Every structure is written in structure tokens, then in C-alpha cells.
Image (spheres, rainbow, N blue to C red):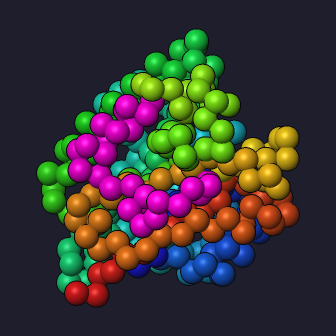
Amino acid sequence: MKIATWNINGVKARIENLCQWLKDSNPDIVCLQEIKTVDEGFPRLEIEALGYHVETHGQKGFNGVAILSKAKPDEVTRGLPGDDSDEQARFIEAVFSVEGHGALRICCLYLPNGNPIDTEKYPYKLAWMERLRKFALERLALEEPLILAGDYNVIPEPHDCFDPKVWESDALFLPQTRQAFRQLEHLGFTDAVRATTDAIKLYSFWDYQAGAWPKNNGIRIDHLMLSPEAADRLTGTAIEKHVRAWEKPSDHVPVVAHLDFSN
């Protein structure tokens, strides 16, 4: 089973790229972030024509997440628990039946950026990550394959960016941010990409500015975090960076994990 995460940076602006990628890559489940549209405005007809079911949790103009899947989910939950006052559309969860293997739970998430750090945005980021940790701890008790996939806006380690000095004062790389990410790992989650390779210069985001893409001045902030039951089925990963060279690209590219449910 091929499961992907991709910050699409505006699904309406990127619909041609998305459809082409779905045809080329043929994933089974896709987690999209920053769809930047209300649910009613999502271009679902084009995607459904390619054989995908669409579930969205959107809002006007920014944020928004979606799960595309070849199989219809058994249940869908919108919004990360823990703060009823949080109106930002950053989380959607879907449960799928896998024949002979019970449930597969997929969470698509778009963590807050957190910049500027001297505003309310950084405390919101840390509070959101703590809510995610508590949620993940509860879900782990179900002892089922679980994937927390999305744009984490977290650079986990120095080798996950082209130059740590550039990022040392950024919310994506501050010690508190990285510690919150490690707390998630310490619950028992596996970073899919790092479970399959120690290679450096593996990035999933390149800024539109300052020639970042041709210089390969990127960062790795899009992650698939696997529960032990999911990690046991991991057979490989890929960062499909060629998509960044297409016309009108997102500044992120798809990150993919392959899981084997054949036995």
C-alpha cells in the first residue's frame, strides 16, 4: 500500500499538477495540506474521476487538509481534540478496513508554522503539538497501524536542512520545537524516511525565493510518523522531488511510504 503526504499549497492552483501526479504515482491514500479552500470549493470532481474518494476539512483562504483514497473510509473525524476554541482546519482522521488485517488509521495534519516566535503564533504551535502528543498516546492504545502524516513544520535534526545556522532562530528548528517532535517519537512512533535511509540532503520543501530549488537549499519538514504496528509493515519510502520542477509547483513535494499488508 502506497501512502503519501503532500502540502499542495492551494489545491485549486495546483489541480493540474495534482491530477497528473495521481496518475503517475498511483498512491492508495494521499494526505493533502494547505488546500486553502472551503469544503464546498474543493475540486473533487476531477479527483473522483481518477478513482479517488475525497474527504476534506477546509477553511477559506488558508490552512485546510484532505484525505484522498481509493477505498472509502469507514469513519472520518475532523479537528484535533483538546481545544474547542481552535477554529483552524489543520487535522482530519480516517479509518480504513484492510482485508484480513483490521483497521488502518490515517491522520492528515498541518502543524502551525509558529513564526514570528515573539507573537502568539509560537505558543499556539507548541500547544498544538502537545495536543497531538496526547491524541497520539490515546490512539496508540488501540494497537493498530496508525500513520500521522503531514507538514509538521519541524526540522528534526541539523542534517534535515541545508544550513542549520540559517534556521537556528526559526520556529521550525528551535530546541523547544524539536523536543516536542522527539516527545512524539518517544511514544513509539517511527519517522518513516529516517527508518529507511540516513542520507543527507533529503528535503521536502524548497522556498520560492533566492533560487532555493536549483541550489537544493531545502528542508525536510513533511513526515510520516508510524505506530509500531505500521512500522512493522514498512518496506520503503520515497521523496518524489521531481514534482518540484513542474510548472506552477507547490513549494513542497510528496513524501511516500510503502506498507506491506500481504501477510
> Residue at 45% across / 26% down in the picture?
175
Residue 81, by quadrant, is top left
The image shows residue 236, relative to residue 241, as above or below, that is: below
The quadrant in which the C terminus is found is bottom left
Percent across and percent down for residue 96 are 32, 70
- In this view, 95 is above or below 187: below
Q: Residue furthest top?
A: 118
> What's drawn in magenta, residue-wise?
177-204
Which quadrant of the figure contains the N terminus?
A: bottom left
- Tell me if I can see residue 97 in this picture: yes
Q: Position of residue 79 (x, y in %)?
A: 41, 41
Q: Quadrant of residue 86?
A: top left
In the displayed structure image, the side of residue 51 where residue 10 appears, left or right: right
Place of residue 2 in the rendered image (x, y in percent of width and height, measured from the top left): 46, 75
Whether residue 184 is situated above or below residue 11 in the rendered picture: above
Side of 246 relative to 131 (left or right): right
Q: Residue at x 48, y 42 (%)?
A: 157
Residue depicted at 66% across the width and 81% down the height: 24
Residue at 53 percent across and 40 percent down: it is 158
